[in-house]
Image: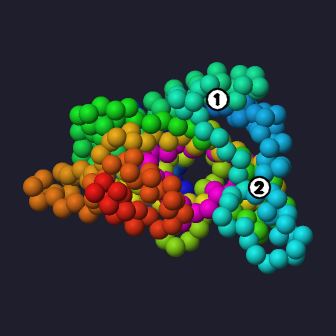
């Protein structure tokens, strides 16, 4: 079973209706899909791959080799213990955002310039993807983006990029690459390694691989899209396996609501004959409050988080 692949360029031609329907099915039944012909140049993607890999090699690898997770795994092996390390991940990671530009890695030639250009292009793609979701859900164009930007109160949505590497793990049975979770926010756009496996999603109770596909952008929906779509588009559990071979690169960008944004189910006109009859299946939450709960419950079942976030508002 393979993750669906969508040719995004076909939205502009005679196959628009068919492509919209394919994306709707992906959102409703999968929560994950891959985009090809998405408008981001192969040259830029190749540059991103190169600077990210070089950054890890020159600026991040020494720190990872001395990290807590490496020490914990080595200790278990030395003790010949059957236990696993379950509270940390076999991952090197750092965050890029507009607010922390001065903290971006600075010793890798071209890193800042390349990643800045990439983030600009990816943010444009995120907005296009949300507009497709608007259309498929029967919402006005720009509805999701406006909600994420604080609605009438206008507080800018957050766009962050998580640069991760999952180095070769000599004992993959002892640790997770990244523990299973759903994503807290809105729309996630992943540029993943095109050679090394590891990412899996939970589909119908079975873990399946998100197959590497050169120059594709993997899309998945977060918890806030689940709320806003009133459960029509559910966030999906996913994880990363620790792998014995290969240094898996993962560059995930998150288009999330502002912390001050109120997220609530939208009255989906396609679902209800009359908006007045609309029944919200999810509570109204303040995204900042939700993130406070998520920080403590990321790897736990998601449903209790919704109610806990409501209590935080109260």
Q: Which residue corresponds to the image point at 45% horizontal and 52% vertical from the top-left?
A: 292
Q: Which residue corresponds to the image point at 51% horizontal and 55% vertical from the top-left?
A: 295
From the image, which quarter does the N terminus lie in? bottom right
Q: Which residue corresponds to the image point at 48% horizontal and 50% vertical from the top-left?
A: 220
Write down the region rendered in magenta: 178-202
Residue 29 among those drawn in magenta: no
Residue 182 among those drawn in magenta: yes
User: Is 126 on the left or on the right of 163, as rendered?
Assistant: left
x, y (%) of residue 65?
83, 49
Label whose residue precedes the other's in the sequence (1 or 2): 2
Measure the C-alpha gap from mark 1 to mark 2: 22 Å
Answer with the quarter of the image where residue 293 lies.
bottom left
Which residue does the numbered mark 2 point to in the structure image?
Answer: 68
In the image shown, does 145 or 18 lie closer to the viewer?
Answer: 145
In the image shown, does 211 or 308 lie closer to the viewer?
Answer: 308
Q: Residues within 10 Å of mark 1 (few under 14, many from 20)?
A: few
């Amino acid at each position: 079973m393979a993750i669906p692949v969508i040719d995004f360029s076909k939205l502009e031609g005679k196959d628009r209706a068919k492509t919209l329907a394919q994306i709707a099915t992906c959102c409703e039944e999968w929560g994950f899909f891959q985009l090809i012909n998405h408008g981001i140049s192969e040259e830029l993607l190749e540059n991103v791959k190169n600077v990210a890999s070089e950054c890890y090699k020159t600026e991040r690898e020494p720190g990872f080799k001395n990290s807590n997770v490496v020490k914990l795994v080595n200790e278990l092996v030395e003790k010949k213990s059957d236990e696993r390390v379950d509270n940390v991940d076999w991952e090197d990671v750092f965050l890029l955002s507009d607010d922390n530009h001065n903290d971006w890695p600075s010793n890798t030639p071209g890193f800042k310039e390349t990643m800045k250009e990439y983030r600009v292009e990816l943010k444009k793609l995120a907005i296009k993807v949300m507009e497709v979701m608007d259309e498929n859900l029967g919402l006005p164009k720009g509805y999701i983006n406006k909600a994420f930007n604080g609605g009438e109160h206008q507080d800018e949505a957050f766009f962050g990029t998580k640069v991760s590497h999952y180095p070769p793990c000599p004992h993959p049975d002892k640790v997770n690459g990244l523990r299973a979770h759903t994503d807290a926010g809105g729309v996630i756009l992943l540029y993943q390694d095109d050679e090394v496996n590891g990412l899996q999603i939970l589909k119908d109770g079975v873990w399946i691989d998100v197959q590497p596909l050169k120059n594709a952008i993997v899309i998945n929906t977060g918890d806030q899209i689940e709320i806003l779509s009133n459960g029509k588009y559910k966030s999906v559990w996913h994880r990363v396996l620790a792998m014995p071979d290969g240094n898996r690169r993962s560059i995930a960008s998150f288009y999330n609501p502002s912390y001050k944004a109120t997220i609530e189910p939208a009255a989906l006109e396609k679902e209800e004959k009359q908006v007045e009859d609309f029944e919200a299946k999810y509570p109204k939450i303040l995204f900042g409050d939700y993130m406070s709960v998520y920080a403590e419950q990321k790897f736990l079942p998601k449903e209790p988080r919704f109610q806990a976030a409501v209590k935080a508002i109260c």
